[in-house]
Image (cartoon, grey):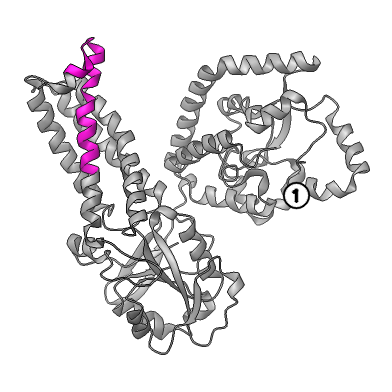
Amino acid sequence: MVLRRRGGGVWAVLMGDIMKSAASPQVHFRWPQWVPYTLVLGDMMALLTAFYFGRLSHAFFYHLNPGWVLLHWWGNFAQINLLVFFVLSTLGIMAFAFKGHYSRRKAFWDEMGEMLGVFILLLALNAAIAFSGKWQLSRLWLFSTWVLVLGLLPVTRWLLRRTLQRLGAWMRPVVVIGCGQNAAEAIRALNSEPMLGYSVERVLVPGGSNPTAGRFPTHASIEPLGEDPLATLAALGKPHVVLALDMDQWEAQERLVRSLGLSYPNLTIAPPLRGLPLFGLEVMHFFSHEVLMLRVRDNLAQLGPRITKRLFDLIAASLLIVLLSPLLLYIAWRIRREDGGRALYAQERIGRNGKLFGCFKFRSMVMDADDRLKQYLHSRPDLAAEYERNFKLRNDPRVTRIGKFLRRGSLDELPQLFNVLRGDMSLVGPRPLLEREIDRYGANICLYHLVYPGITGLWQVSGRSETTFDERAYLDAWYVKNWTLWYDIVILLRTVKVVLRREGAY
């Protein structure tokens, strides 16, 4: 969780995030004062490009020559379409500016979620104007334009930031103040989002602390903060600062916290709090009182979000079953053809509220898999530890030829779409537990029981079989505490990437 100081109006926020001087000899800046305007210009170019090529939908629909359509003026409808699109695009740029897309660094998927929200609002306004019947305009052209915007805008932003990154104008030096676990976690979080452009250049250690260099996931130099922190930071060129003290250091470093909080303009605070739901966390402050309160919100404990998640599951699972039905039938035929055994089986798993259910899978092992496993582990006791970690073996002798192919692409789990329709599972959620895994899950089992297990989840897109069981339980708990529909969509998109790359699958 990161709390960041804001204030000073839109211009102040816009310009306050631009580094005025190079903070470290390891990072060189070129034209940093142009960066926000370049980002705005990039979005404008993406919008105009989408509008220009959106006219192609007319060419295809009315069987016109695409080249002629793009190279000639488009008649009386063009003026109204251009006016409507100009107004809506201006509103979109203003919304992005208000949300800080041009002035503050944001994690990729959070920014994409905000972009999608703005896009849906603009599309709704477009529909209201288009179907009001007051103006003669091309609805096909406008709606085709917004479909192109949804694809062009993220790609343009990514390409532009990569270009700025290579020029040195996007990278921003960061100094982390701290010496414990909280500082290490803050560095890992920054390193996990390379498109943020934050480069940890130094770790400054407050007086009286003795850090261990090996604990930090960075090659940055570790140096003392000194008696005058503001002077130390000024000598470094006033870089962006992340204050990441551990809980036992806050009282001892109260003077440091006050000094930086009141005097330093570029400050991000990473409080040493763990286990809280982060999404929707609301900061409360009181007039004339130096008290900070955090109001948490558990989305899946509310009826509305649960209904939304269930409707999304039903609609998406139904569509996927219809689209994938030829593949499902082909896989079932191939399995039966290989050894004559059944194509599907149902394995008992623990579901919501601790209830047992039959989790459907395509059979990827031989018919007498359990007996063969006992014989194999008895003859190879050195593999027992590997099996105990996630109840999987990298080279499992029980897996059939077609089963190896199914497992590499996680195709053996496709029948679980029917579990989703039955109400046993969700598309996204914690990995369904075996009964023997309950005791190993620890205190997080109470969170597991609150939701339906998922076909995919945060664990599957974060290393899958390469992660330990404890890491899996932590990721499942994080997902339950921080659920949003957008995060479900993000996990589904990342699942496609993981499956295509076959990451961590065996």
Task: Note whether residue 114 is visible.
Answer: no
Quarter-of-image position of residue 49: top left
In the displayed image of the protein, which residue is found farthest to the top?
63
Percent x, y of residue 379: 93, 42
Name the amino acid, label 1: Arg
Residue 290: image quadrant is bottom left
| Above or below, 267 relative to 112 | below
The residue carrying mark 1 is 389
Residue 145 appears at what percent x and percent y? 24, 28
Q: Closest to the observer: 437 or 390?
A: 390
Question: Is 221 situated left or right of 372 in this image?
Answer: left
Q: How many marks?
A: 1
The N terminus, quarter of image: bottom left
Q: Residue at x 21, y 13 (%)?
A: 65
Characterize the local packing of mark 1: few (<14), some (14-19) or many (20 or more) Cα atoms within 10 angstroms.
some
Secondary structure, magenta segment, majority class? helix
Q: Secondary structure at mark 1?
A: helix
The one of 478 and 452 positioned closer to us in this rendering? 478
Tell me what residue is drawn at x 42 percent, y 83 percent. 254
For the record, the magenta segment spans 43-68
Q: Give the residue at x 51% y 80%.
A: 249
